[in-house]
Each structure stands twice: as C-alpha cells, then as structure tokens.
Image: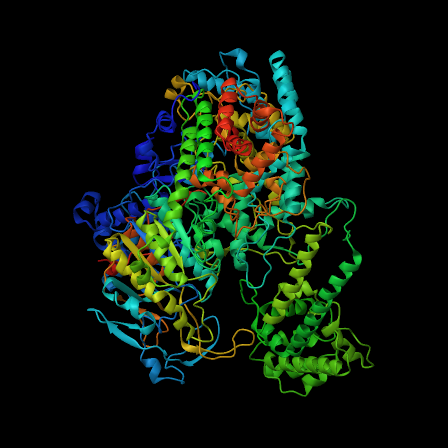
Amino acid sequence: MTGDMTNSWPVVWTHAAGRPQRSAPGASSRTRLFVTCFLIGFCPLLSQTHARDDALQHFEKHVRPVLIRNCVSCHGPKKQESGLRLDSRDGALVGGEIEGPVINLDSPASSNLLRAVRGDGDIAMPPDSKLKPEEIRAIETWLKAGAPWPSDGTVTDGPTPSEGWKQHWAARPVVAPPLPAANNNKRVFTPIDAFILHRMEANGLQPSPIADARTLIRRTHFVLTGLPPSRREIKDFTTQFPANPKQAMQRLVDRLLDSPHYGERWARHWLDVARYADTKGYVRLQEQSNFYYAYTYRDYVVNSFNEDLPYDQFVREQLAADLLLTDDDNRSLAALSFITLGRRFTGNQHDVIDDRIDVVTRGLMGLTVTCARCHDHKFDPIPIDDYYALYGVFASTTEPSDLPYIGKDSVKPSFRGDMTVYREKKKILDDQVSQHLAAALDMLRNDTTRYLHGVLTGRKEFLVPLPAARGELRQTFVERWIEYLEGTKRGDHPVFAAWHALNKLRKEEFAAASNGVIYRLAGNTIIRDALRQTELASMSDVADVYGRVLTDVHRKHVAAGNNNSDLKAVDNPAEQQLQQVLYGQDSPFAMSPREALDAYLLDAEQNRDLSQAYLTFDGWLIGTGQATDRAHVLYDSQRVHEPHIFIRGNPERTGRQVARAAPRLLGESLSAPFTTGSGRLELANAVVSPDNPLTARVIVNRVWKHLFGTGLVRTTSNFGLRATPPSHPQLLDYLAHQFMAKGWSLKKLHRTILLSGTWQQASNDRLECRAIDPENSLLWRANRRRLDFETLRDTLLSVSGSLQPEMGGPPKSLTDADNFRRTIYGHINRSSLPTMLPLFDFPSPDIHSPDRPRTTAAQQALYLLNNPFVMKQANLLANQATANGNGTAATTKELYWRALGRPPSDTEVQQCQHYFNAGGRENELAQALIVSNEFLFID
Amino acid sequence: MNHFPCNRREMLTRCGMGMGAVGLAPMMAEAQSGSSTAPLYPRQPHHPANAKAVIHIFLNGGPSHVDTFDPKPLLKRYEGRTLPIANLPTERATGNAFPSPFRFRRYGESGIEVSDLFRRTAECIDDICVVRSMHADVPNHEPSFLLWNCGDARLPRPSMGSWVTYGLGSENQNLPGFVALCPNGLPTQGVENWRSAFLPGVFQGAHVDTQFQDVDKLIENIRNATIPAERQRRQLDFLLRANQLHKESRGFAPDLEARIQSFELAYRMQTEAADAFDVSKETKQTQQMYGESVQARTILTARRLVERGVRFVQVWYSGGQPWDNHDDIGIHGQLSANIDQPIAALLKDLKQRGLLNQTLVLCGGEFGRTPTVELPRPLLNSGKQLGRDHNHHGFSVWLAGGGIKGGHVHGATDETGWKAVESPVHVHDIHATMLHLLGFDHETFTYRYAGRDFRLTDVHGTVVEELLA
C-alpha cells in the first residue's frame, strides 16, 4: 500500500494511462505562470533588473502597467477576446483572429494596437473608456523602439510544438528498424523477442519461464475469443504442447483466429473505440431516441474481424463506405455508423460534429484534435484551423431520413413475417403520415407570402430546427425556398424570371426601373399582370404579389376539391405553370414525410403525433426480427460547407475561412485541401496512407494493449507530444511496419505476437525483477489480467452450459435474466446503462474510450454474491455437475473441471467434502467457484 | 482437518490484513495492472476545510423564487398589467405581472423574508445564506439539470457528486460514496444527473428510489434472495480458503488480495447498508420531527448516510420535474408541504448532532420562474392561467452549514424579479464555492482525460467569498 498515493492530494488519475500519477495540471499551472509574470511587471525592483536599456525600462514603467490595467482582463490568460493576448510580445505579434497582428514592426505607427487605442480604426479600445493621451504616446514610443519586451517566461522554453513534432517519435516515418541483438538466443522465438530481450538484458533482467500448457491455452482462449477452452481442448493441448510446443501453439492460435468468437471478442474492443450504443442519448424534443439499426454496425465489425478485412479498408469503409461501393452488395454501408452512432447533444450540430472529429482523430490516429475547437492546441502543432478543416468535412454531410436497406444481393426491402399484419400496420402509419403532411403543406402554401419575405431577409444561421407552433415561420422552409429559387435562375423560368430580374435592381433605382423590367418581360401572364397592376417600390412588394398569386391558385385548387397535392390539368397555361411551382416534382413543397418531419415543418403537435407513429411502427418492425437490415448512414450533402473557424469555438463569431483538409501535422501532401464532395474519402485515404506515421502505430499499439494488458504506449489514444513515450519504440515501429507490409492484416499481427516467447511467459512474481522494474514495463513476465465484464458474463454462461451461440441481429436487454446470448449482443442504452456495466468498469459510451479503468469494489462482490443472474448460472452449473449423481467426489471433480478447467487437488476434494458434510449445497459451492479469483484472473 | 489450518480471523490476518483493518481497508493498489483499486479511500483536499460532506436538495422542475425566497411587492402594484420592463425571453410566452399568492414574513434575527411555503425552513434562517441573484444559461429543463449537476449543459461531463467523491473518497467503505436519493422513479435526464462520465464508474452516484422501504428494493443486490446469511457466511469462508490457496503459489499479488478483501466488505455492507437505510431505527421523536412524507423519509435517510460518512448525498424531490408549475403556481403549496418540515428538521437535527458545521446543505432548483403569468398554449397548458414559465435570468438558491455565512442574503434580482442584477452568481460560481468549502481550488482540481485537464467548472466559476462565514 503506497500511502502517499492515496492519502494526499493532488492525485490525478490520468485516464489514458490508467494509473494514478502526480500531474501538474497543464492549463492551470500555465495560468499561474502568467499571473506571476504580471506581478513581476508591477514590481519596480524586479523591473529594474530587467531593464537593461532605456526602452525596456520605458516599457516596464509606462507601457506594461497600461496594458495590464486596460487590456489584459480581456486579452490575457483568463480571456482572449477575438483570440488576442496582450500579455506577451508573441501574443501581440500573432495577434487576433479578426485583425491579425496588432504590432507592425515594419511600420510601428500603423500598428493596429495604436489605431485601436487612438480609436481611429475600425475598432476602438478599451471598449468603455479611452486611454489618456500620455498613455497612448507611451505606447507609440515603445512601438517605435521596436516593441521590446523583457523575456519573462511567457514564451515556453524549448522547441515550439511544430519544432517538437519534427523530432517526435510518433511523427517519424515508419521504417523497419534493425533487429537488435539478444544474448538469450533460445528465447528468441520471433523478432519481437529480440526487441524485448534486448531491453531486458540491458537492464539486467531475464525473461520468465514459458508458462505451463493449461495456463497458455486459457490465456490464449480468453484473449482471442473471450471464452474459456472446453475440457476436450484443454486435454488435447496439454498433451500436445510438451511434445512440440511450437507446433501446438501455432495450431492453437490458428484455430482460435478461425473461430467466429474471435470476431465477437475483438469487435467489442473496437466498439469501445467507436463509442457504440443503441440509443442517441439526449435528443432534441420529439426526436426518437433509438438507433434501431445500430446492431448492423456491430455485426459489420464482428464480421470484419472474422474475415480479417484489411485494417486500412476497415477504416476507409467506416469513413466513406458509400463512396466505395462497387456492386449491389451494400452491406458495408453499416460501417458508416462509426461516424453516426455518437450522442446527439439535443441536436446541437456543432457538438455532434465535435464528437465525430474526436472519434476519427483520437480513435484512428491518437490525435487530440478537439482540443483545438476553441484555440490552437496547447501542446501539439494542431492549429484551430485544422479543427475547422475537419469540421467542414462533417458539416458537408447529411443523414437521410429514410435509412437504406442493406443486403448481399438486393437493396430492396422485404419483410419475412406475416404480410397481412405488416400491411395493416403500414396502412395505419401511411394514413397518419399523409394526413399530417397534407395539413402541413396546406398551411405552408397558404403562407407563401411570408416565406417569400423570409427569402428576401436571407439565410439565417440556426443550430437546429425546433418544433414550431402553428403559424411560426420555419427557417428550414425558408431554406428550401432559397434553394428552389436558386434553381430557377437558370434559363428563363416562366414564373420566376421576373423575380430574378427585379431582384437585380439596386434599392435606389427600384421604383423607377421596375416598370421597365416588367414591361420587357415575357413569361407567366398571371404574374406579369399582377406585377403591372401594383405600385412596386421594393422587392417586398414583389414578394407580396407572388405570394398573393400563388396563394390564390392554391385556394382555388383546394376549393375545386383537390385536397391532395397533385397537379391538376387546367386550361390556362399560366395557371398550370403556377401549379408546377406549388405541386410539381421540383417544387419546394415536394418532400417525403420523413423529410418534413426531420425539418420540423409540421406543427409541434403534428410532429409529436407523427414521431410517435413512426416510433410505434419501427419498434414493431424491429421487434419482429423479420425486417430487412438497415444502416445508420450519412452521405455527402449537395452543397458542401466551406468552413470558417469559430472564434473561441463560438459559432456566432466566425473568423477566417479554411479549406477542408486533414491535419497539417501529417505533412503537406496528406493535408492538401480536399476537392471531392465533403472530402470524406480523401480524409480516409489520408488516415490510412502508408505515409501517415500515426495510424498503423496506433492500431498495433491497441492490439498490443489488449494482448498484454498495457500498451507499448500507455496513452493509447494520445500519441501527441504529451503522450507517454513508448516503452519499446523500435518494437512499435517494427510492428507497425510489418503490419502495413503484410497488408494491414490483424490476424497476421496476432500470429506474430502470440507465437513469441514474450507472450508465452509465466506470470508469477519474481522479487529480484520487481525490484528493478516494478511496473513490468520491460515485460519480464506476463501481466496477470482480470476478465472484463463481457468476458465474465460470457464465461458464466459458458461454464453453466447456457450460452446461446447465435450471432448477430437486434440487441437484447442485459437485465433480462433469460438473456443467454453473448454480452456484445446486449442492448446499450447510453442514457441508462444497466448498473452492473459501469460497476464493472464498462466505459461510458458517450465518448470515444481509449481504455477502461480497473476498479475493485465491494459492490462488484455484492453483484456476484446476490444477483439473480449469477445465482441462476450457479444453479445451472450445479445441475450439470450433479447430473450423473455419482456422489460428492464426482460432483466436486465435475464442478472444478467445468468452472476452472482443471481437476481439483486432493486438498480441494477434501475441502469440498467437508463443505458438503457441514450442510453446504452444490449450487453454493458452484457459485463460490465462479466468483473465485482463479475464475476471474488470467495468469 | 489439516486442511483447515485456521479460522477466518487467522485467514484474513494471513492474507496480510488484520480483521480490524478490514472495515477501513483500502482496496489495495493493483500495482501490477497499474490501476487504482482504492478509489473510495478518504483523501485530503488541497487546503483544510470545514465541510466534509454535502447534502444537495434538488427541487427539480424550477421552484419559483418570487413565491419562496425573493419577495417582490412591485408585482402586486402591477397586478394584471404589463410590467414597466419588457418580459424577457423564456421558454414560452408570458403576460402580465403575477403577484405571489403566498405571504412573505420576516424570520430570525436576520429578519430575512421568506414566504409561507417555507415557513418551517425559515425558522432556521439564521443558519441559511440565501442567494437571490442566481442565473443560469437557458430556460429549458434538460440542459439546466445537467448544468447544475454536471457543470455542462450538453457534453458528457462527470456530475458534481462524482467529482467530490473522486476528490475526497468516502469515510465509509461499506457504503457507496455518492448516493442519489430520488423517490418515485428517475428525474428528467435520468441517471445522467449523477453519472461519472470519464471518471471511473465507482464514482457514479448510486441511485436509490426511496419510495420503497424494503432494503432489497432500495439497493441492488444487497441481499441474497435464496441463501440465508448463515449459509452465505459458510460459502464465503469456502471462497476465502479457495482464494487463499490460489494466491499462495503466486507470490506478491495485491490485485488478488484486494479482491479477497472486497468480498469481506461486501458481506459487511449487506448489514451496514440495510441499517443505514432503515429509518425506523430512529427515535419516534426524530421521526416526528421530520414528518411522514416520502420526502421526509428521504431527507432523514440523507442525514443517516452523511452521519455514516457518505460523502455526497443528493435528495431529489421526486422523479420527473414536479416543481414545473406552468399552469398553477398553487401546486407549489402542495409540494412545499411535503418538504418544508423535513428540511427544517434536517437543519436542526444536523446542528444538534454537531454535524451542520461539517455538512454543506445546498437547496434549490435548476432555475426560477417568471414574475409574469404564463400565457396558455394549445396542448401545453391545462387551461388554467395561474402559473409561471421558467426563468433562468434570475432565481434563488440557499446554502447552509459547512462554512456558510448564516442569516445572510447575497445579491438581488431587479424590482420585478426578472433578472439577477446585483452581484449575479452563476451556477459555475456555486460549484466553485462548494469545492472551496470542501477544500479544493476549483481551478486546479482536475482530471486528465483525452489529452486535457478537465474541471467541474470548465473554464468558468469564481468562489463567492461573500457566502463564506
């Protein structure tokens, strides 16, 4: 027990490292540093010592105090209005996001700082008062002297992030390192051992002996498949291994990698990375909260691991499967849920995008790009521009309201159940839908005048459409009108040519010139006549005319008994043209019910009813288990988003425009601006390019972590400058290089590692080694590990004989005591996880999770002692063990074999006998075994 | 019998810890795997502090400040007319001035005015500091719940109870360190209100639905439904021997050791937790002092937990958002009738037991309500026009104990009660102040996650010195 570790503060558990360590909290300590600097500035004695020449003295006496009194509260350590800091020379030279550098060394007199304090530029500062004339003069004098500023520690020591990155271990190109020499030749099974032994020997350590056969088969089974070996498998392996260890291991590893359970186990590791859940978390009003088809992503991941889909392709599909389809097999579309299955943040699109940037950058490349949402990254060379370069990619995508059906041969939906019931349910839904939609569209058509006025007001930034009350203007529909009118600019649109011609007129000339325009126009006669009959002073009047005409046509249309939105043949061609605007296929009113729903075009009440109707139908459909799979996909938007940075992360304050691109620290060629659509495919290609130094290193490190318990790099999702450096940098490079050279095959990577002597070591403690390397970072033994929750639950099911082998499909509740499927098929509601999941360190699916904490708590023991699910498995196990009824000795033997995969020792047989003699029951004993340390820990 | 060399006491001693140590035993560090297994062991904060525990009474739904702790006589003058200042934007449209139907009186030596809704609580006003200048960010429940409880309206951040338990551990290893007591189901936003987010799951609040009185229903897995205690003890003794045998051949293994201890703790917890939640063990006099409502039982439970060393107890009024009285502010009367007496009892009881000085009591809702009447809207109102809409521009909360200045009013809303104008206090400031009272500098109390140091107060928050005794 290390007393100081738990008894004193501050202790900061670094999640990524997964260990307690003292940490100097970065941001805060910097703040203190800056505060200290100001105090120095105030202190005359100290400033004297700094002032080696007159200019510096002038600065300390007459300029710095002015800056501190008037500027630094908004442009300093606490606040950086418009990104500007005036507490260091660098800060002033870099300047703000709006006006750029505020000091111009070439032409001091035209410095923005001076213009601002004088108030003769665009910006007058300070905002509430004006500096005294002598203060302004002092600043001017200082600027003219070259703006000297004493070195005061605000500039970080050492290299800048960009310089640091050039030397950074994770930034160097991945090249195959030479194999190091190791003395203990006979323990070099694979090249991996050479790297490990080399470092071990340099530290005076020798590896542990190879573990015994039973330990090895158990370890390999659990790590590769998350399930225990059967009695038969144990017996076979323990016979084969002593005779030919190499061959036995090879066969074991091959067999397990071929097992479908391998995919189930390793998919779960990936789902942690992908923050997988079956629900959306906190949704906007009335949005339904299920990702009904999330399971298709989970199944995609399971299959990808089982089929050993090359990792680069796995990544490409998760970012851009829709752009990679080559035939009718569109099953890979499910991969896109890697992006879409995150939280919905009440529909706040900026947060949704932030989450997507995070999962892509941290999850795939170990880069903490989201740190740059509000300002340049503090430690890594990731400027705020890079964040918004990626923001632009995801802002250029949309999620269709009608999710695509996915399948091998057909993209057509089908229902395999009772079609009569299906049609019945579908009809109820369709009727409700068409009724609501008709009502909504009727209202919108009658409101045409207001919407045309809305068009004139122009686009408004809005975060998310919200349900509106009856009669409220829908910004989303204004958008539709704007886009529709854009489309009518081409050629001579019969109805809107006049609109566009008039809209070109300048305000001042409008009244005078509009008549001329109208009289030159051909086109729709009804519009033309109406325009001619009106005094037109501005476009507002034009909007009134168009609105009135279109509304009249609609009223007439309805009055004639046309309650639906169909075109109706009329004699007057001009009226027919107007009908086209209102009811045609390209009309702003032409939309699917789902589109109307997603855009919140309906009234709040209608919206609620319709959401409920869909919810009921979708829920029923999934519940039948007879529905064709769909995928939560996203596609490129028709209009790509050209991103601007948001100053301090505030979407209401946009700064300079940036190009959509990958982070620039990847190098010039990989971070070239994207040119095709949103740029998702280009992004994917940049991520998995062999020239990307990060991606391969990050994934081989993740694999290493799951195989050995800790990564070569402990901060598995942070490979930045502040990451823990790798314990074996050359080994990391070797693995990454081999991985890419062998076609990004995860199964090959597993083989390379699992056949090494390093993997096969025993886990027993060795005092002399622990003295040298207490954390075992040199791998002088195997790390003893603990079953995580999924493996624990799956193993309980397995030893009790109740595990259901079916793979894939819709999820089932984990709190259902009769759910005997593997845990990966459990339903994950991210707003309400079953309590045992967090209790056993299941990570929050709200965000990408690099690592799970490992806690030991009494509540875990309570679960294992008292929970009905565990009790049930104990009972089932006891029933099986006593099935043959051969007395307590035989029962004991059966229980030990089934629960622990070995026969009991003589001592244990006697202990059990004693337990039974004292009135103990089989199910109690069975439970004791399945909650024991031997059951839970893997040597 | 050679195989049973010792009894359980000897066995545990041989495991490396005396029996006496078990109750307080920290879960030992898993040196090998590198993860902490002593997450709930008590720890010292940054600086010495009075407050050791927090009881947060959350009147979920948005209790009206102008009907409880912030008297506004001006509303009477403008009754039925528009106020002299324009109505501020809130969730729904509101109309004319709507004076409080509840009478305010002065209480205590401090003479602070409190309405009849909290007349019993008001008897303790000299121990209470009322903050009348609260403000939050938006007039909607969901983000405001999360802002109060987790310091951020949308992003998945740890709750304040999780932060505090992460920082201080807990004084009682046989109970969860952070308990969220909420009768009748879950509040709006459910378990997100007490989530641990990226902090280890052990710091998540343990939800207890206090509508139940049976301990099995109060705490998950607290009792075995089929194996009686005596048999379970025998089962555990068997387990202990099996684990001991397993450990013997493996040398130094603190991870195995910690788990062995955890089962002994679990066994004790079964008794201790049952006891902690059993309010019938209180004297008749104490029970009467608190009253009979489910809220009374909940608040009495909170005191029992804090008394036993639980670090952070949240008392939710009830599931959902009961204080959200859009149509009829009169319902506030029914609500306060259930909780006024228990709150007063809590404050007096804590004081009597010498616990008030070390227990910070915080009471309020996610926002206040408008001084103007809410206008009816189809589907949203029951047809009555006697209620108030949400108001995040200005509202009141109060604090007591744990180093808080009693008999004090801090800040003020404008004359209408619309907006905090004098010494405004943001929710982040309350968080900063709470952490300060517990001994933390909220700016350096951080957790590194995803390459960044996170704080409960993010980049906000100022300790409100005027609230401190």
Instruction: Please tell me which residue lies in front, A900 or B187.
Output: A900
Displayed quadrant of residue A125: bottom left
Displayed quadrant of residue A109: bottom left
Displayed quadrant of residue A444: bottom right
Q: Is residue A567 visible?
A: yes
User: Residue A361: x, y in percent?
Assistant: 53, 43
Q: Residue B284 vs residue A424: left or right? A: left
Instruction: Please tell me which residue lies in front, B52 or A153.
Output: B52
User: Residue A7: x, y in percent?
Assistant: 30, 37
A229 up-or-down from A109: above or below: above
User: Residue A633: x, y in percent?
Assistant: 65, 51
Q: Residue A854 vs residue B129: left or right? A: right
Q: Is residue A310 visible?
A: no
Image label count: 0
Instruction: Please tell me which residue lies in front, B450 or B329.
Output: B329
B307 up-or-down from A758: above or below: below
Q: Residue B161 vs residue A677: left or right? A: left
Most distant residue in the left direction: A45
Point out the image quarter for the C terminus of chain B: bottom left
Q: Residue B345 vs residue A324: left or right? A: left
Instruction: Please tell me which residue lies in front, B6 or B98.
Output: B6
Query: Please, which colouring scheme is shown?
Result: rainbow
Point out the image quarter for the N terminus of chain B: top left
Q: Residue at x 32, y 74 (%)?
A: B116
User: Residue A766: x, y in percent?
Assistant: 42, 18
